[in-house]
Amino acid sequence: MEKGIAESRSGINLPKNPQRTLVTASSDDNLKEIFHQIRTSKTPAVINYGASWCRVCSQIFPAFCQLSNKFPKLSFVYADIDECPETTQHIRYTPTFHFYRDGERVDEMFGAGEERLHDRLWLHS
């Protein structure tokens, strides 16, 4: 999984991430590679499915980035549904968060809420 990507095609700037646990999926192929890495590495992960035009996504994204530094044992992925249309066609609401453990999706959260997200991350870390 490529780490430390500074900007997605949608123009979302990723903050400094010293643990290098935050990546962005830049295409369907890239997201497929990330899924493969999640399945094979067994590292706990969270994927934030959002969109550049989604106001709620823009509000929770800074907290998602900050939390990536607070939970270094988790891999954090941001996937813009417009950049990865094939692999995100099942996403019906943005933001949607999928949580993975041992290569399997174990939880899902719809909508924003920094405290809710923090609690879910704590639960899955």
Image (tube, helix red, strand yellow):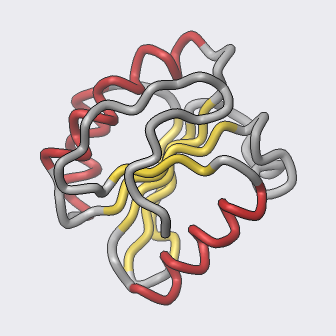
How many marks are shown on the rendered structure? 0
Give residue 10's quadrant in the image: top right
Residue shown at 84% from the left, 45% from the top? 85
| Residue at figure coordinates x 24%, y 44% from the top left | 17
Horizontal relation, residue 14 to residue 9: left or right: left
Quadrant of the drawing holding the C terminus:
bottom left
Q: Residue at x 83, y 49 (%)?
A: 89
Expressed as whole percent of the image width and height from the top left, the position of residue 97 reads 49, 46
Q: Residue furthest left?
A: 70
x, y percentage for residue 41? Answer: 41, 86
How far across and down, in percent of the image, does residue 47 sit? 49, 52
In the rendered view, tell whether residue 102 sits above or below residue 24: below
The one of 71 and 33 positioned closer to us in this rendering = 33
Q: Residue furthest bottom?
A: 40
Residue farthest toward the top in the current orientation of the protein:
55
Instruction: Report x, y in % for residue 28.
Output: 77, 57
**12, above or below 118, in the image:** above
